[in-house]
Amino acid sequence: MRKKIIVIAFLVILTATNVFALSVRVSLTNATKGEKLSDYPFKILAVDQDSYGRVKVLKEHEFRTGTSGFYDGKVEVAAAKAIMSEVNYRGVSYYSPLIQIKNKQDKYNLDINVYEITDKADSVEITGRSLTITPYDDKSLKVNDSVTFVNDSKFTYVGKYDNKLKINKSLYIPMPAGYVLMNANGIDREDLYTLGGGIALHEKVVPGENSILFKYIVKSDTGVFDMSLHNQDYSSIARNISFFFTKKGDWKVESTNLQHRGESNDQQGLYGDYHAWDGNDLRGVKFKILSPFHKGFFSLWQASIAAAFVMIGTGLVVMKKKIYRWKLVKEKRRLAKLLKKLDGESDEEDLRGYYKSFLDVLESRSREIEERLKS
């Protein structure tokens, strides 16, 4: 009886294990050479995904492909909602698309392409950029900034050392002055550098199209927001760029090289009324936003600056007079000491006739100083 119970328990455990095991077929291909990767290590990841799209790895399994470049077998997924495969080739990690686990489906195909590497950036460029700007208050703006870039070669671009930035970078994205980055979707924060005038990526750029959504705040104590983007000589120019600004009260927008294209109702999933501006192949973008606050502040600022100049000018005049009188008094005292000394020497040596011309000049200068001090 006891043996039967043990056997039944074993069968139950085995059955439960098989329920959470999936049949997978994994294919590894070197897309640069058009060859399969035989006898090459890879991982299958059993993952969970929350409502925000964030992935959490629950379990990892390591396998190797066969001589044909394929792997066929079973993988335990436990409570995972999806699976994906990962392979590291030439120092770059590649992933298959995330595949959701479905009820009554126990066979899944995971295909991964890997590429040779290059440090030539000829095939990497920013194809489009879209900034959706919403006033938060009179002194700050919220910005959703979507950047799309493409690598249209069959090589993974690994970047190179930038002597000007002193970092290894694969792409440089200019940003508005005074931006404060809040979030970046589509890239690991460890794969970017936030610089004063922009963001530098040091993530490898794999072939195909990639996109990143930056969310940041721009603040201004004056109510004047300079949203201009200044490309550097070493940075890629966005082929197409668009600005969308929420219509709100007395806010104003100024741009000298973007064209106003009317209005839009939906941008990046944000609904509302937006004014739209766009441009193509611009080395630099000039775009400024003025809040209603800047008018009153600017007038006060002008008055403050004018008052400061008046006070400085008045102070300089007063101080100049005081310094001048102080120098005259100092010179008068020095002349008095010199006259007293010459008088004593001329009487002692009976040289009054010899010193007369010197004494006359010094006494004349002393009288002149006295008259100036009285005026």
Image (cartoon, helix red, strand yellow):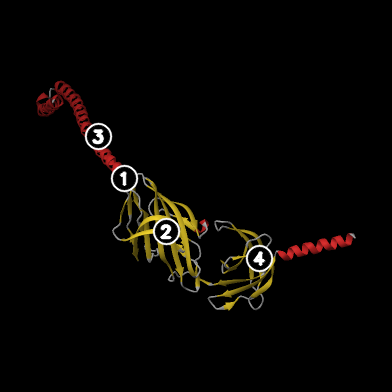
Mark 1 or mark 3, earlier in chain: 1
Q: CA distance from mark 1 to mark 2?
A: 27 Å
Q: Which residue is mark 4?
A: 103
Task: Classify mark 2: helix, strand or loop.
Answer: strand
Residue 34 lies, with reference to residue 22, above or below; the image says below
Cβ atoms under marks 3 and 2 closer than 8 Å: no
- Residue 119 vs 228, above or below: the answer is below
Disc 3: which residue: 311
Which amino acid type is shown beneath numbered disc 2? Gln
Dot 3 falls on a residue whose secondary structure is helix
Residue annotated with mark 1 = 294
Question: For this rendering, which residue is in front, 181 or 133?
Answer: 133
Per the image, the residue denoted by label 2 is 267
- Does any portion of residue 231 appear in the rendered image? no
Question: Could you tell me how far apart the alpha carbons at marks 3 and 2 are, in whole angstroms?
Answer: 51 Å
Tell me the quarter of the image containing the N terminus.
Answer: bottom right
| Left or right relative to 120: residue 326 | left
Question: Between 341 and 72, which is closer to the camera in this rendering?
Answer: 72
Distance between the Cα atoms at labels 1 and 4? 60 Å
Earlier along the polypeptide chain: callout 2 or callout 4? 4
Q: Is residue 326 visible?
A: yes
- Residue 365, given in percent of the width and then of the height, sits at 13, 28
Q: Is residue 295 left or right of residue 142?
A: left
Residue depth check, mark 1 versus mark 3: number of the one nearer the observer: 1
